[in-house]
Image (spheres, rainbow, N blue to C red):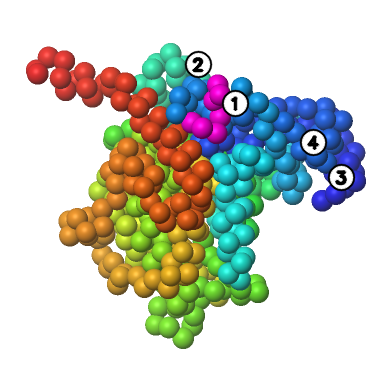
Amino acid sequence: MSIETLEAFLDEHAIKHHKIGVFDIDGIFRGKYVDRAKLLSAAAKGFGFCDVVLGWDSNDQLYDNAAVSGWHTGYRDATVLLDLATLRTIPFEPHTALLVGSFTGDYAAVCPRTLLSRVLERAASLGFEVKAALEYEFFVFDETPDSARAKGYRGLRPFTPGMFGYSVLRSTVHHEIYHELLDTMNAMDCAIEGLHTETGPGVLEAAIRVDDALRAADKAALFKTFCKALFQRRGLMATFMAKWSSAYPGQSGHIHVSLHRGGQSAFHDPATADGLSTTMRHFIAGQVRYMPEVLPMVCATINAYRRMVPGMWAPTAASWGIENRTTAVRAIPAGASGTRTEYRIGPADANPYLALAAAIATGLRGIEEQLEPEPPIVGNAYSATLQQAHALPGNLAAATERFRGSQAARAMFGDVFVDHFAATREWEDREYRKHVSDWDLARYFEII
């Protein structure tokens, strides 16, 4: 899209307000409104965005261990380039356009969107186009930000009660909000191809339609942001945290990936017994082999590891299987148009750009190294033998230590990113260890 085309779009849609922004290291959309002149200037030359958004956590607390941004940089402006291909309108903000950008220059090395772009450039150099789709589980509550805080996030009231997985009753009774979510995301070019209730009070699952990998990440990141906005506008709250209650399974953010050459699947091979090509087998082997070394890019929060408990529909070991939902990587043989891997380790709270970069880069490394996967797991992947042999790091601190020391991660993503991201996760762990939890109090207050 040219600047002239952008101006024509603004005129055609009677745009009066312009929202621009970037996604930070935690996948949070940070942005602002600008006037038309500023938008056109930013579209042509880029614009400055305070580098503090790369130097603080999800609670706006400044890192004390980061080199990229901090008091030593003076929190200067970092250049952001807008991607005009992300232009869209916001249905519930009349006459408003939205554009997403990426950090460039000195900050490109740690920009999540730019990192994914670099991984996709690597795929292109190997002759592959990458398609992807993400799907999310999220709980909806009959609460507001004020009421949830007043309750200390305890005793929250789910939007609907009971265990009603795939319930047509629930989606019919509350069809207005389902329709609004479907229509909103369709209008924002984040079309949902499937939407249904999951097992648990007030939990939904949305599968976003497949697209080129960068666009798929954009759509996933925007979906999470504007899904939450839509529900809050209705006096409700949606949460994508990985596990909000010990009583229910965690919330997944599964990642589907396929490679293509010249528009044809590089994963499908009708001549093999399972329909999987040699390329796909190498890709799976790479995903499994390097999953423990890139785990913080996917499971990036303390809470993400609460989800990784046997029997709770979340992988706890690096494994793969064919149509096996207990494994970390599920191979889906779905013919020439749909054969793909499903990276099931992903939680709903993951940054889509980083999680997708990890899922793709490790698979590409498997192709480059011509790795062969172990035999696929048949049956329950939570078996004790498998856990002992292929266990994933069990908490953020252990995962980050392994990530920081991984030469493979440094080769795939660069030293600057690995050091910066590891520092942010070490900060997250330190913040957590300062906290006295309800479990601590109930466990130790009286008896110890």
Q: Nearer the viewer, mark 4 or mark 3?
A: 4
State if disc 3 and disc 4 touch (CB < 8 Å): no
State if disc 3 and disc 2 touch (CB < 8 Å): no
Q: Determine which of the numbered discs, if any, sits on residue 73 in the image.
A: 1
Q: Nearer the viewer, mark 2 or mark 4?
A: 4
State which region is magenta: 66-73
Looking at marks 3 and 1 on the same chain, the residue that comes earlier in the sequence is marked by 3
The residue located at (42%, 39%) in the rendering is: 422
Looking at marks 4 and 3 on the same chain, the residue that comes earlier in the sequence is marked by 3
Report helix, strand or loop for mark 4: helix
Disc 4 and disc 3: Cα gap in Å?
10 Å
Q: Report whether residue 396 is seen.
A: yes
Q: Report whether residue 167 is seen.
A: no
- How far across and down, in percent of the image, does residue 241 sit? 43, 35
Looking at marks 2 and 1 on the same chain, the residue that comes earlier in the sequence is marked by 1
State if disc 1 and disc 2 touch (CB < 8 Å): no
Q: Determine which of the numbered discs, if any, sits on residue 42 in the image.
A: 4
**Placement of 248 over or under 294, stated as above or below:** above
Disc 2 and disc 3: Cα gap in Å?
42 Å
Disc 3 and disc 1: Cα gap in Å?
33 Å
